[in-house]
Image (tube, helix red, strand yellow):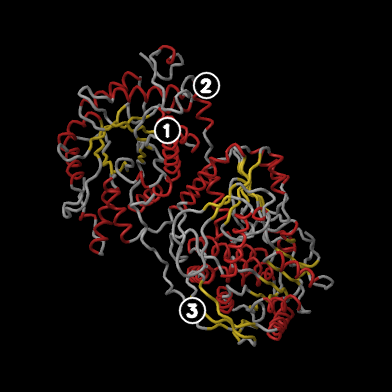
């Protein structure tokens, strides 16, 4: 059995790993080269990044802009339930909410995806059949990622076989913090490979960095680049099981990373903050952050998602407020 | 790139203001008429006349100085220092209570974005009063001698770029040290000083402690030349500062000058690029570049020049230029037609001298005074745009190859007010900072202000310090800095 924290893991696994996109094809040729590349990325000044996020947080989004922002935010929600107590009934009820978030208002958009544990992906898939709403499944020994690679890959295969359209994997933070970047890279590549379906096509791969455990913004930037070079379709902040989860400065650094990565390689990667985004105000701040950092190309559910559960109800309440001019209570939105 | 996410207008309401059609002088605790011909103050964003403001003649200034002298001898001078502190605390709290009113009025009269007047100017002005209020009864412990004494009457002349904040920088230390004040606000931005006069009344400040005499250059000259003024403090252009220094030479008056600048913002190749770009933007486009310590010369290491300039241009493309009262505006109006003319002139010179001008796309409003954020590349140290203070949203980009060259070029200016250093290497920051001849050096940030930190210049940027313990010395007898 291979364990990534085993120092001999690399040499035992001699399978060739595909090179990243040009112009970065050679940066993963050795552990040393990859470390030099990641540590050569421009640093992030934490005070400056926090100040920038704070200024963008003062943008005043009103009337028509607010209406657009709320609808866009709803369409970007990955409606999530990741509890030990999840049941098929709970997943079906969430799926119903995902299709029609506000039963009283048919103009309300549906959400982007429903996010569940892999064993419930099949239930979600059936419940969402024909809606265009994706099923996302967390895998790779979520949330800690502390299992052997074989187990993680089996976890992914299982979720894909259950019909997951998107896989939310966690990186091996232990290996990352120990400086074994190539291990982390290879694991993402390996997961990406098993996302491919036999009948053709491939599940979208979201790579969870768990920034609350990486702690520094320098690490966030390095992990973002690592995940993008390994072929991740999305980079995602957090599992939601570690605090702090998504914060604006972290999201800012990740948006800068996807912006710079596209400029260098031509490949666009999405961003998903998850955990801790509970209010419409928070969601709108994130949209402002996208608009003024990565740019308007990321303002769509194809390139930006909110991993959230309680956020949706606040968005719905604010949406009702804009339409009717008054606030309604929590009983005017459904409890999931 | 057009965005589907267009921010709807989010204007701050003017209704909080009680703008009067005309304003008098504030002398001896009362609003009185001026004897000079009144002048009009404009909203630079629309050219709308906001109010008529009195012009103080020599006789009016004399009245104000006599009131200040009386207040100094009878009320403010003899008062227990702790009581002076109480008045300053009261003023600081009133500034906070009326913050929105001050912010809206400042943006209307000056043209600066409400985001800046609300989040920077007004809170900092209040902070200056709070900070100096604390000093009022502790002056003998400031390390400025065992028994520092006030000078008497301070004549103060302030500029239009931060009307309320410069007033606070001047009045707060003067009052805390026991002096009384005759202050002349700038001709184009007198309104927040007059609102401040109302605050003085509201705080029950004894009459004559603060006198505000509005007017143009002649009024300012009368304040400075008045024989009974003991201390002159001026913030403004180097040319006017030099004429004041000549006028004050040979008199008993003490003088501090805070003049122009042409600050270098030095970006090394190991800088945190995204934050450096933010700092460059903040350095030159904060307050439309109407900042004496603006980072108007970007010195970027040649190896990262293209990358930094490209990021900078992309970032400038997201700046929102327009209505100063809109809460989402980043860049407001140029303060006056005269200043706009000067900016245009220097920008034309820059192009004629062969530098490459770049401006983002986008339309400017039809009415009012506006100038697009502008970046000049291929600038040589010999160009006028690399030497003269533009005092507008115009950045000159120069390059360097080694740390020594960066220092040499940064110091190669007749000014020396501020500088910035961007690097992730702490030892380099300390080494470079030590060699820069500038009063304030920021590391990995720019245009950060705090009342505890002294501010002032080298060379033609002036002399004397404002703020901090050092700033108190300028208003005390028997205190050397």
**Relative depth, front residue between A262 and A103:** A262
Residue A302 placement: quadrant: top left
Numbered disc in front, either 1 or 3 = 1
Cα separation, mark 1 vs mark 3, equals 56 Å
Element class at badge 1:
helix
- The residue sitting at 70% across, 63% down in the picture is B258
Q: Chain of mark 2?
A: A
Q: In the rendered image, is residue B97 in sight?
A: no
Q: Position of residue A90 (x, y in %)?
A: 19, 39
For label 3, count other residues whose C-alpha is less than 10 Å away and answer few (under 14), some (14-19) or many (20+): some
Q: Chain of mark 3?
A: B
Cα separation, mark 1 vs mark 2, equals 22 Å
- The residue that mark 1 highlights is A265
Of pointers 1 and 2, the one earlier in the residue sequence? 2
**Relative depth, front residue between B450 and A187:** A187
Element class at badge 3:
loop
- The residue that mark 2 highlights is A32
- The residue that mark 3 highlights is B19
Q: In the rendered image, is residue A325 in sight?
A: yes
Above or below: residue B250 compared with residue B7: below
Residue B463 placement: quadrant: bottom right
Q: Chain of mark 1?
A: A
Q: Position of residue A137 (x, y in %)?
A: 26, 32
Tag 1–tag 2 contact (CB < 8 Å): no
For label 2, count other residues whose C-alpha is less than 10 Å away and answer few (under 14), some (14-19) or many (20+): few
Q: Are callouts 1 and 2 both on one chain?
A: yes
**Relative depth, front residue between B20 and B344:** B344
Element class at badge 2:
helix
Above or below: residue B51 compared with residue A263: below
């Amino acid at each position: 059995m291979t364990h990534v924290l085993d120092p001999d893991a690399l040499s035992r696994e001699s399978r060739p790993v595909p090179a990243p996109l040009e112009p970065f094809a050679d940066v993963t040729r050795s552990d040393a080269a990859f470390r030099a590349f990641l540590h050569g990325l421009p640093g992030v000044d934490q005070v400056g990044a926090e100040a920038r996020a704070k200024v963008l947080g003062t943008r005043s989004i009103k009337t028509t802009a607010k209406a657009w922002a709320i609808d866009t935010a709803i369409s970007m929600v990955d409606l999530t339930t990741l509890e030990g107590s999840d049941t098929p009934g709970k997943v079906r009820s969430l799926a119903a909410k995902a299709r029609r978030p506000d039963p009283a208002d048919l103009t309300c958009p549906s959400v982007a995806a429903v996010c569940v544990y892999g064993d419930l992906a099949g239930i979600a898939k059936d419940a969402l059949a024909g809606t265009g709403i994706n099923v996302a499944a967390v895998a790779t020994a979520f949330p800690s990622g502390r299992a052997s690679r074989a187990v993680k890959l089996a976890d992914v295969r299982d979720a894909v076989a259950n019909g997951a359209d998107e896989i939310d994997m966690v990186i091996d933070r232990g290996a990352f913090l120990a400086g074994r970047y190539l291990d982390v890279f290879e694991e993402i590549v390996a997961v990406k490979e098993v996302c491919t379906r036999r009948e053709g096509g491939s599940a979208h791969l979201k790579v969870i960095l768990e920034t609350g455990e990486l702690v520094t913004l320098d690490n966030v930037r390095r992990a973002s680049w690592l995940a993008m070079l390994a072929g991740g379709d999305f980079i995602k902040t957090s599992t939601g099981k570690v605090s702090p989860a998504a914060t604006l400065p972290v999201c800012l650094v990740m948006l800068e990373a996807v912006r710079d990565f596209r400029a260098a390689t031509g490949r666009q990667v999405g961003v998903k903050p998850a955990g801790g985004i509970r209010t419409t105000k928070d969601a709108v701040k994130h949209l402002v952050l996208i608009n003024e950092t990565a740019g308007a190309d990321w303002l769509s559910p194809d390139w930006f998602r909110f991993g959230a559960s309680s956020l949706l109800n606040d968005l719905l309440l604010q949406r009702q407020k804009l339409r009717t001019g008054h606030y309604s209570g929590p009983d005017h939105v459904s409890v999931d | 790139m057009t965005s589907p996410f267009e921010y709807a207008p989010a204007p701050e309401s003017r209704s909080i203001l009680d703008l009067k059609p005309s304003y008098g002088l504030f002398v001896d605790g009362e609003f009185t008429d001026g004897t000079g011909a009144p002048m009009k103050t404009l909203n630079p964003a629309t050219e709308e006349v906001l109010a008529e403001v009195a012009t103080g003649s020599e006789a009016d200034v004399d009245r104000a100085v006599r009131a200040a002298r009386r207040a100094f001898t009878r009320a403010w001078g003899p008062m227990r220092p702790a009581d002076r502190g109480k008045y300053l605390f009261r003023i600081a709290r009133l500034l906070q209570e009326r913050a929105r009113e001050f912010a809206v009025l400042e943006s209307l009269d000056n043209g600066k974005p409400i985001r800046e007047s609300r989040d920077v100017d007004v809170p900092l002005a209040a902070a200056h009063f709070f900070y100096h209020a604390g000093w009022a009864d502790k002056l003998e412990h400031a390390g400025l001698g065992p028994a520092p004494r006030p000078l008497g009457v301070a004549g103060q002349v302030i500029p239009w770029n931060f009307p309320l904040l410069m007033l606070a920088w001047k009045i707060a230390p003067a009052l805390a040290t026991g002096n009384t004040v005759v202050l002349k606000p700038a001709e184009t931005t007198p309104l927040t000083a007059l609102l401040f006069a109302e605050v003085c009344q509201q705080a029950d400040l004894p009459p004559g402690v603060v006198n505000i005499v509005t007017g143009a250059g002649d009024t300012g000259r009368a304040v400075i030349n008045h024989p009974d003024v003991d201390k002159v403090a001026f913030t403004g252009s180097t040319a006017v500062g030099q004429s004041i220094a000549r006028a004050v030479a040979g008199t008993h008056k003490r003088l501090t000058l805070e003049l122009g600048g042409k600050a270098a913002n030095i970006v090394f190749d190991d800088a945190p690029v995204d934050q450096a770009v933010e700092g460059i933007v903040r350095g030159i486009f904060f307050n439309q570049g109407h900042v004496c310590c603006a980072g108007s010369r970007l010195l970027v290491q040649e190896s990262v020049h293209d990358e930094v300039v490209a990021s900078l241009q992309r970032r400038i493309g997201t700046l929102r230029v327009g209505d100063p009262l809109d809460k989402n505006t980043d860049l407001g109006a140029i303060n006056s037609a005269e200043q706009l003319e000067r900016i245009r002139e220097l920008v034309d010179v820059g192009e004629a001298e062969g530098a490459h001008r770049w401006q983002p796309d986008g339309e400017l409003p039809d009415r009012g005074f506006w100038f697009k954020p502008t970046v000049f590349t291929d600038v040589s140290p010999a160009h006028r745009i690399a030497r003269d203070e533009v005092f507008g949203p115009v950045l000159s980009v120069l390059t360097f190859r080694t740390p020594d060259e960066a220092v040499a070029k940064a110091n190669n200016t007749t000014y020396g007010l501020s500088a910035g250093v961007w690097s992730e290497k702490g030892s380099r920051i300390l080494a470079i900072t030590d060699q820069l001849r500038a009063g304030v050096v920021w590391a990995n940030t720019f245009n950060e202000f705090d009342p505890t930190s002294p501010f002032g210049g080298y060379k033609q940027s002036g002399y004397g310090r404002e703020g901090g313990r050092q700033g108190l010395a300028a208003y005390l007898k028997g205190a050397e800095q």
